[in-house]
Amino acid sequence: MEDYKHNMGLRIKIQRKKLNLTQEVLAEQLDVSVKHFSEVERGLSGLSIENLIKLSNILGVSIDYIVKGEEDKDKWECTLSTLQQVPKGKEELIKELINLGIKLSN
């Protein structure tokens, strides 16, 4: 059987690092200890459903992606299509808007 906690933790860690977030920041936003969050990323512990929902919103990925490594293809294709229409030179603006959206959703 696939070690789902380990793989889930890796996906969380990769996404956290992509967004330049620390374990401390996410632990605080989820109201868990840094030790517990570290254990989640190492696949030693899990998250409550409530915190899984919060985390997916913070990281900007689906719960399916966190748990199973799969994204909703229709949603992903729509997002990708929209991002491909961004004019050249405006990529940094998009990154800033995404980060702002993540902050506002918390």
Image (cartoon, rainbow, N blue to C red):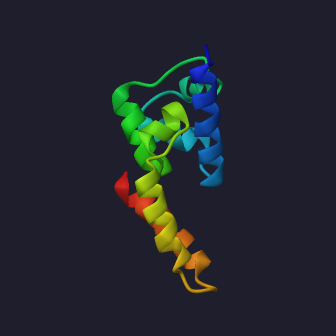
The residue nearer to you, when weighing 59 against 1, is 1
Q: Position of residue 28 (x, y in %)?
A: 47, 38
Tally of numbered discs: 0
22 versus 101 height, above or below: above
**Residue depicted at x 41% and y 63%:** 101
Q: Position of residue 82 (x, y in %)?
A: 46, 72
Q: Position of residue 56 (x, y in %)?
A: 44, 43
The residue nearer to you, when weighing 34 against 64, is 64
The residue nearer to you, when weighing 96 against 31, is 96
Residue 5 falls in which quadrant of the image?
A: top right
**Residue depicted at x 55% and y 75%:** 84
Q: Position of residue 8 (x, y in %)?
A: 57, 30
Q: Residue furthest top?
A: 1
Left or right of 20, for residue 55: left
**Residue depicted at x 46% and y 51%:** 73
Residue 31 falls in which quadrant of the image?
A: top left
50 versus 14 height, above or below: above
19 versus 68 height, above or below: below
| The N terminus: image quadrant | top right
